Amino acid sequence: MKISLKALKYYVDINVPVEELCDRMVMAGFEVESIEAEGENIKNVVAARIVKVEPHQDSDHLQICQMDIGKEELVQIVTGAQNIKEGDLVPAALDDSHLPNGMHIKAGKLRGVPSNGMLCSGEELCLTEADYEGASVHGILILRDEWAPGTDMREVLGLDDYIIDFKITANRPDCNCFMGVAKEASVVLGSAYHPPVPTYTTVGEDIKDYVSVEVQNYDLCPRYVGRVVKNLRIKPSPVWMQKALIASGMRPINNIVDITNFVMLETGQPMHAFNYNDLADKKIIVRNAAEGESITTLDGKEYNLTTDMLVIADGEKPSCLAGIMGGKESEIEDDTKDLFLECAKFRRDSVRKTGRALGIRTESSGRFEKGVDIINVGFAMDRALQLINDLDAGDIIEGALDCNQGLPEDKILNVTSKSIVDLLGVEIPEEKMVEILNSLCLPTTAKDGVLTVSVPSIRDDIEGRADLAEEVMRIYGYDHIVGTPMRGNVMRGKKLPARVKSDKMKSLLCGMGCYEIATYSFIASGALDTLNLTDDDARRNAVKLINPLGDEYSTMRTQLVTSMLTVMATNINRKIEAGRFFEESKRFIPKSLPVTEQPDELPTLCIGLYGKDEDFFTLKGIVEEIMSLFGAHTQYKRSSETYLHPGRQAEVLANNVSAAVIGEVHPAVAKNYDIDTKVYIAEIKLDVLYAINKRKTTYKPLPKYPAVERDFAMLVDADIPVGELEKAIQSGGGRLLEKIELFDVYQGAQIPAGKKSVAYSVWLRSAEGTLTDAQIEDTSAKIIAKLEKLGAELRK
Amino acid sequence: MKQQLEQIKTAALEAIASAQNSADCENVRVKYLGKKGELTAILKSMGGLSPEERPIMGQLVNTAKAEVDEALSAKVSQMQAAAEEAKLKEETIDITMPAKASKTGKLHPLNTVLNDMIDIFQSMGFDVVDGPEVETDHYNFECLNVPADHPARDMQDTFYLAENILLRTQTSAAQVRTMETRKPPIRVICPGRVFRADEVDATHSPVFHQIEGLVVDKGVTMCDLKGVLEQFAHEIYGPETKVKFRPSFFPFTEPSVEVDVSCSECGGKGCRVCKGAGWIEILGAGMVHPNVLRSCGIDPEEYSGFAFGIGLDRLTTTRYKISDIRLLFENDKRFLDQF
């Protein structure tokens, strides 16, 4: 809400500098977004008298002026304007001056003749006729001869005002106007508040002979007041009103429209002016739009209406979108003779829904959406009539058509002063509370420790003790609140088990050289296509945003792989030669589509690696550390993810439950991300890992007896996974087997085609005693037997 | 014979003194102490002496032998020490050579800062809880005193997934879930991801993070709120930091305040960081609105409480002086490595 300081001073005495006013308003709950000093963009421009004018020798239109700027020496300025003569007082921008249109003026030469500045037109000073008479004249602005040469133009133009932009919080729509802010300022400054007291005279007659008003939907329009003004005398509004409108960001149009806008800014209550002569059947009907109706609004656009939209109709058709915008047909124009004036309260969600549906938002609809006061409707109408009367804009017909179903009484609240003190923790004397509440126009009395507060409808944000506590506190001053240390039992807070587990996992990942990343939870609708998923892949059943910022952020992700690939692509593209990354975030899996309830949010870990030292097995190593952290027994199965290399991927089972898919990214998928190097990705279901009950660790005695190491080298069919061989060794080794280590796998020269050479070191140990040769030979034989079952040919 | 012994000993000691290396020492040992060595030869030649002279001479020879042996040992160990020293000297390295990278990763800066915050609040007895990111209108708005036609809904542009299902705009939604499942005294923080329809730029992101705090108990006052926030501010910004309340509005708290801390950069004098104000706005807070307590089944006549919401992203960018919030979501390794 932008308000000029001068406009504010009309309603409240302000005897402090503007900065202090703003500081104090901020501490009462009215944040100041900006303070703009009027004319702060005009620098080094003065009123100057033309002492002498001579023609320029080398030009048919330039003139050389000798200017008196209040100093001993005259200043020479060359101008192209023709409307000047010796003796005129004009604005002169001197050397190194700034104009509000952004121009920076410096001394120079015009066709060889030195010119130490520029004479200014009204336009160059961004002035309109409202600011200074003659400002719109083509040529130099001729000033009234009431200033000494050398006077700063800001003083000449009376630019000593400030425009303050207050941020009004959503609970205080009553302060979205001059009077609301002024009332608060008067309380904050402890100075007098003088609201206007509307009076006007009518020309008699009876409004009922002119028009009828019928409200068909009181639910959406609890109050509608109509008045008629005839014999309009349409002309520009006075300068003070135009200035107030401009300061608050509105454009002056004519006296009638300006009065409705000014009253809106002053009282917070929007109004609408209809051309009375255009009203069919001389009827005003407040009703829902009928099926198939449409309206062309003031801005010339046509809208098709639906039956949930409230309109102000005449006897035939909608004439105005209630609270939003008037119709083109009943617009006030320069030749409009008679006026029907509307002042009403429309329900805020009705205005909001209609505005949203049609894509229209106006100063008026914004105010209705925030809420207007039903009582204030009457005041605003009277104030508008007062201005019509005072500005002689027309003849007011006697009588108001005031449609409502009863106006509310003040709400009475009874609250103990102790309960306010208890909530705030500050001992505010009861008399002080009463004084503050009364100053805020909340009539209050105190008896036996109980405050009885009468709350008018304009303050319907006040519902009980907490609201009253806030009213008292913001005026009493928040610096009275002194921090007290935490009371109650001293204890350390707990984390949820999942967070504890996640923290440990992240430490482990960092220890293994992985960097944590953070990416958005929504992705592009087509992102899944980059993974070459099949059409019926379950991950395609993703929840979509109804109102995304764009397709790029439109789909809640059902996997973390695409985000990880994007991050790796960014790093690869920036020539970062290697990277290990992880992200812990959620997958959003809908229970049904379209969604009717919250989707499952499944905690998920994604790991991505690339670089010359990385391969499938470095990724497998990281994954195994994580599995081991959670105490999972891990198995690997070949898998068939479309985004992974068909021969280099695995499903990971944790205690026989599918927990992860790991592998090298399919080159075709990598290409979708412009990745031309090998990248590896694991996606791990943390819900599975978090659910594992890790067995308690118990101590195993350290071995007392020596271990025996035996090597087993063999030829096997090339397609037998080494995992199978390991299982065979394990089962053959039995209780005595301590450790297996694969130390060689070889295929190629000297090995028969279709075979591979595999070599293991195996450690045997007994807890009961040193192994005898017989035990060792027996166990080795069992291992060999198991291996031979797999077709292994042991090499001696 | 005595004289001869004396000469041999002197010669041996000279030879030891002039020995240059271990081979010289070995030669000396063989020449004088060995089986065929000169001192050994003298012992052997004592057969020609009288029985009275023999023990006397024997003792003299043994003393000489011991003397030579000791000198030799001393020489050998001296030479070994010198050799050791020379070797160590040779192994000297240039300690200014670059370190071999230990290759650990880092937490994302948002989580580094979050963990600090969790530590602070845990130590004050706050439990750390979670809530869903996809919320219902009921938890995100209705229970938080923002009914359907309320203008406060416009304060936060909301992403919807269905008519009553949305991406939570505030971690305050978790407040309600907490109050529904726990009974006072309640002391929790809920860190989490929130969403608002803000176009992406240097200071806005449609995805960001908050830490919601909630305390509900008998007799909780606004002074208690300030006390907790002061302690938090002292831990995060330093013990000299001052905390200021400014009245504001949030639908779910009443009274509501914006909380400023004195600028840690200039100590409140005004500088570029605080744009000359001397204060930096860090969070919104207030006393839990009675309607909110009521909607969670807690009697506002019996209990009171306070809540606060801290913007984690803002805290992170100010702590590390990160100029553009987009860097947090770009995940360039060179960026991630700095925290």
Image: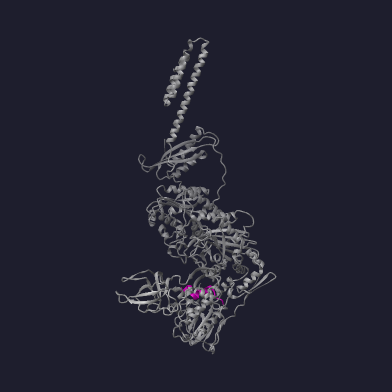
Position of residue A517 measured from the top left corner of the image (x, y, whole percent): 46, 55
Residue A115 against residue A714 in the figure, above or below: below
Taking depth in this image into account, of A284 and A75 the one nearest to the observer is: A75
Q: Main secondary structure of the magenta part?
A: helix
Taking depth in this image into account, of A763 and A53 the one nearest to the observer is: A53
Position of residue B192 measured from the top left corner of the image (x, y, whole percent): 52, 59
Residue A752 against residue A106 in the figure, above or below: above
Left or right of residue A53, residue A589 in this image: right
Among all residues in the image, which is located at the extreme front?
A: A72
In this picture the colour scheme is: one colour
Q: Which residues are magenta?
A: A356-373
Taking depth in this image into account, of A582 and A682 the one nearest to the observer is: A582
Does residue A591 belong to the magenta stretch?
A: no
Position of residue A528 measured from the top left corner of the image (x, y, whole percent): 42, 59
Among all residues in the image, which is located at the extreme left?
A: A58
Q: Is residue B35 visible?
A: no
Residue A442, quarter of the rendered image: bottom right
Position of residue A293 measured from the top left corner of the image (x, y, whole percent): 46, 80
Left or right of residue A458, residue B95 in this image: left
| Total numbered circles | 0
Taking depth in this image into account, of A218 and A189 the one nearest to the observer is: A189
Q: Is residue B107 visible?
A: yes
